[in-house]
């Protein structure tokens, strides 16, 4: 076969489809913050159209703007702790070892996809950086020619496929933490720990199926032959040099360069964790968002060894939290307008939407409609936790009305919420900084995943939803 024929052949099939989709999203999608601002305006206009007074709308906006302050910080910490752990020396050495495992270009892409999704079950922020660094490590191999764009897209699969089915799921963490739930939502759902959501066998099975599907698509869509574009051909520098730590220059810095305090802090954290596990149910402990963040933060401190190295990693991680910090207050304001600004007949937009979803009825039709609604809304509101607070009041009220299992309703949201990440490149930003690529280099591959994932997800939420019984919410006493 001639070189030209080989190139034509290698560009056919899934790889060619993926590459043909690459530029559209980056060209037409504005920054996610613009979507959040537009969302507030749209919800406010909708409330006015519903008969709410301007006074009620602006009061709801201002009063609700800071309702998610605690949760905003918690979600920023998910990103920060994941980044810090992923960039620690022990994890870097692990990544270098894992990079030597694949033997072919397609298997290299598959391995990155599988490992990024596996790590994402623990922490999606960790997955983004871990996957990106693994992709770079494989790209540095001189004995294997792999498409760098496909590696980068595979590194994003942790967030683009299964992140919300894992332990750092914003919606599941929120529903398991009474102090983070807005009072209006707490009265509808009560507290749902991980045993009701991510650790149900149905959710774990769904996660396994989607993982297998994603790996298969990544494998068969990886460019081959002369269609491969390496990091060098894309003019990307992939030489990772560890950041140098300035030497100690004065006596007062001694503790900054010592492992004593990190070890003592870690021992205190370990003691607290043991105490929690002895005195409380295991699922209650692992469902605690604050506890989860404490463990990951101390893990990052220990893995970096000294306070100075740890703080250096934190400084690098902080920019990745910017989107969360400025967007979540807008989502809180949207939720407040939806649930507090009463219109004609004394009904809020949230109550009208709950009535609409209730009229759909229960069973598979409810699950499919909620999933589709979540996908569409997620394209324009790229935030799992923030969007859940906008969506949850009326979705969970409707689920209660039609007697749909509330824990499964959270998981319907979670599995569907990941899909828009394959289209809207907002959450790619931290990964793109690691890879030194543009969104359009990856979106063609991720959009291809979306085309396969959507029908599979709709089928799964319909079929698996039939295995649940309705359990009335348990509302905690004040």
Image: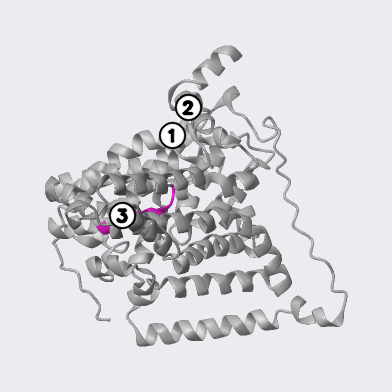
Disc number placed over residue 447 in the picture, else none: 1
Q: Are marks 2 and 1 in contact (CB under 8 Å)?
A: yes
Q: Which residue of the protein is positioned furthest toward the right in this rendering?
A: 249
Q: CA distance from mark 3 to mark 2?
A: 36 Å
Q: CA distance from mark 2 to mark 1?
A: 7 Å
Residue annotated with mark 2: 21
Asked whether 57 or 207 is in front, the reply is: 57
Query: Left or right of 341: which side holds 167?
Result: right
SS under mark 1? helix
On the image, the x and y values in percent for residue 301 come to 63, 72
Q: Are marks 3 and 1 in contact (CB under 8 Å)?
A: no
Task: For marks 3 and 2, give the one nearer the viewer.
Answer: 3
Disc 2 crowd rating (10 Å Cα; few below 14, some 14-19, many 20+) is: some
Secondary structure mostly taken by the magenta-highlighted segment of the chain: helix
SS under mark 3? helix
Asked whether 110 or 389 is in front, the reply is: 389
First in sequence, mark 3 or 2: give its number: 2
Disc 3 crowd rating (10 Å Cα; few below 14, some 14-19, many 20+) is: many
User: Can you say whether 319 is above or below 9 in the image?
Assistant: below
**Magenta segment includes 391:** yes
Residue annotated with mark 3: 338
First in sequence, mark 2 or 1: give its number: 2
Query: In which quadrant will I find the C terminus?
Result: bottom left
* Residue 155 appears in the picture as rendered: no
**Magenta segment includes 222:** no
Magenta-highlighted residues? 382-393
Asked whether 69 or 137 is in front, the reply is: 69
Residue at x 46% of width, y 31% of height? 221
Q: Are marks 3 and 2 in contact (CB under 8 Å)?
A: no
User: Can you say whether 154 is above or below 122 in the image?
Assistant: above
On the image, the x and y values in percent for residue 289 come to 43, 70
């Amino acid at each position: 076969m001639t070189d030209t024929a080989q190139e034509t052949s290698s560009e056919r099939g899934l790889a060619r489809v993926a590459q043909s989709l690459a530029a559209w999203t980056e060209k037409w999608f504005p920054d996610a913050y613009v979507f959040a601002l537009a969302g507030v305006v749209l919800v406010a206009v909708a409330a006015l159209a519903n008969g709410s007074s301007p006074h009620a709308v602006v009061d709801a906006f201002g009063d609700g703007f800071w309702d998610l302050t605690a949760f905003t910080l918690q979600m920023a910490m998910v990103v920060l702790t994941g980044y810090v752990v992923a960039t620690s020396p022990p994890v870097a050495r692990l990544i270098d070892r894992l990079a030597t495992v694949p033997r072919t270009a397609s298997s290299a892409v598959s391995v990155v996809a599988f490992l990024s999704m596996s790590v994402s079950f623990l922490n999606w922020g960790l997955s983004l950086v871990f996957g990106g660094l693994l992709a770079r490590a494989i790209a540095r191999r001189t004995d294997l020619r792999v498409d760098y764009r496909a590696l980068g897209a595979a590194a994003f699969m942790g967030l683009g496929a299964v992140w919300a089915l894992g332990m750092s799921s914003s919606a599941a963490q929120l529903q398991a933490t009474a102090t983070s739930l807005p009072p209006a939502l707490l009265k509808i759902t009560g507290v749902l720990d991980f045993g009701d959501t991510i650790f149900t066998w149905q959710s774990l099975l769904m996660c396994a199926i989607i993982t297998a599907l994603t790996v298969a698509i990544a494998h068969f869509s990886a460019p081959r032959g002369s269609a491969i574009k390496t990091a060098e051909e894309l003019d990307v520098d992939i030489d990772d040099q560890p950041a140098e730590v300035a030497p100690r220059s004065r006596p007062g810095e001694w503790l900054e360069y010592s492992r004593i305090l990190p070890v003592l802090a870690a021992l205190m954290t370990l003691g607290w964790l043991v105490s929690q596990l002895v005195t409380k149910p295991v699922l209650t402990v692992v469902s605690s968002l604050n506890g989860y963040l404490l463990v990951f933060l101390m893990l990052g401190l220990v893995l970096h060894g000294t306070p100075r190295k740890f703080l250096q990693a934190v400084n690098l991680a902080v920019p990745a939290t910017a989107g969360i910090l400025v967007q979540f207050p807008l989502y809180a304001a949207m939720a407040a307008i939806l649930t507090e600004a009463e219109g004609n007949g004394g009904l809020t937009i949230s109550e009208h939407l709950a009535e609409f979803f209730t009229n759909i009825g229960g069973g598979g039709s409810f699950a499919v409609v909620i999933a589709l609604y979540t996908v569409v809304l997620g394209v324009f509101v790229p935030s799992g936790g923030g969007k859940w607070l906008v969506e949850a009041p009326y979705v969970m009220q409707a689920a209660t009305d039609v007697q749909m299992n509330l824990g499964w309703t959270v998981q319907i949201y979670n599995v569907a919420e990941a899909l828009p990440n394959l289209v809207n490149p907002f959450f790619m930003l931290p990964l793109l900084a690691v890879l030194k690529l543009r969104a359009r280099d990856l979106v063609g591959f991720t959009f291809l995943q979306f085309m396969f994932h959507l029908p599979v997800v709709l089928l799964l939420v319909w079929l698996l939803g039939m295995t649940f019984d309705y359990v009335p919410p348990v509302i905690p006493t004040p």
